[in-house]
Amino acid sequence: MDVAILGGTGDLGEGLALRWGADTDHTVIVGSRDAERGRDAADRYERRLDSYGHGATIEGTDNATATQQAAVVVAAVPAYHLADTVAGVADAFAAGAVLISPAVGMKHDGDGAHYNRPSAGSVAALAARAAPEDVHVAAAFHNLPAARLADLDRELAADVPVVGDETGAETAATLAEDIAGVGAVRAGPLANAAEIEGLTSLLINLGTYADIDDACVSFE
Amino acid sequence: MDVAILGGTGDLGEGLALRWGADTDHTVIVGSRDAERGRDAADRYERRLDSYGHGATIEGTDNATATQQAAVVVAAVPAYHLADTVAGVADAFAAGAVLISPAVGMKHDGDGAHYNRPSAGSVAALAARAAPEDVHVAAAFHNLPAARLADLDRELAADVPVVGDETGAETAATLAEDIAGVGAVRAGPLANAAEIEGLTSLLINLGTYADIDDACVSFE
């Protein structure tokens, strides 16, 4: 499967690219606003994977070209850039492509991190509005700690809640379970995205107050 | 320790009373709007505990009397009754008592359960407003599945996120860890309560869509 990661030079993008590179045969395409930055990041990830003995294929390009080439597009950009990023590549989606939002809107104050729910209902809803109608939209991967994901020496033990339409959610769940140590749990349609997006601020507060850095969540 | 459970005849109250009865030496006082209903529930819980070989002390009375007798008061009532319930017993709190809110505001629609955040910021904030100033307020126990809690044949494997002032949160964390199979994780001051309260609707959605009934959450 060809998986594009828009904003693939950021922390979560790096973590996902490295894990899919290490654990799957997917071709990962790192998208960036700047094609050269995308290529540089892809080269860096490939070298890192190579140093761990993984001969993965990581390509790098601009966000629109990445979108064109992929069946699945993960928009790993900050929440406040998400709608613009998706709108900017809207013409590039392949027919029946899947768009996955891992973005979380948060504000931080002296007490901790707080979920900043958009009036659209969720950040994922903003992505869905900006995407063409025939694109399947899902939300997933919010709760994977980026730093732990990007450190291939660290094991994961996480369940990823997934919402979306049937095709989108099924694809996101498969991509989550492709990563060693990660399971997927279905939480309904995209209308339930806020319940997932809000979890990340709790995890950040646990890092601050419970001394659980890069917390993984499991449900049983 | 004497622990009052206001609304102790409800599902969560029953579960907490049974677990503290089974796993600790605390005196549990089941509060109800109606003292006789409180006593009936307490007798029922004692008999259940007795059938499992636990000689626990469970008392039952009205909410105000329960509050008077306890160092810790758990307000296990529906979110929309919480402020009224706390205001109704406000004169009864012992000096320096701890009030713990396990209440979650939710609305349900055809898609799933959604956190219904009060304009006060959280349900716990409503409880704090209704309580006397010298009462320590914490929020905890939202994410313990009531049905699993109340079934002493089922094991728990859950982490309970706790917020509140230092005394309140410390007390809530201790009471959580008193229950076999339950850990406590600190998530900061009461201002971070919404991040905890929101988790419950995700757990309900997982029950609906992921076939994980009565999900326990762990963080590691």
Image (cartoon, coloured by chain):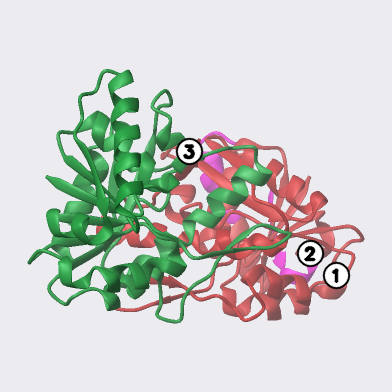
Chain colours: A red, B green
Q: Do residues under tags 1 and 2 come within 8 Å of each other at their CB atoms?
A: yes
Q: x, y percentage for residue B220?
A: 37, 42
Say which amino acid is labelled 1.
Ala
Callout 1: few (<14), some (14-19), or many (20+) C-alpha neighbours within 10 Å? some
Q: In this view, does A163 lie above or below B105?
A: above
What kind of element bears circle 2?
Answer: helix
Question: Is residue B206 toward the left or the right of residue B26 in the image?
Answer: right
Neighbour class for label 3 at 10 Å: few (<14), some, many (≥20)?
some
Residue at the disc numbered 2? A67
Q: Give coordinates of residue A74: x percent, y percent.
A: 68, 60
Residue at the extreme front of the image, as rendered: B36
CA–CA distance between discs 1 and 2?
6 Å
Residues B108 and A192: in front is B108
Q: Nearer the viewer, mark 3 or mark 1?
A: 3
In the rendered image, residues at marks 1 and 2 fall on the same chain: yes
- The magenta span reads A43-65
> Label for residue A92?
1
Task: Tell which circle, 1 or 2, labels the residue nearer the N-terminal end.
Answer: 2
* SS at mark 3 in the image: helix
What amino acid does circle 3 point to?
Ala
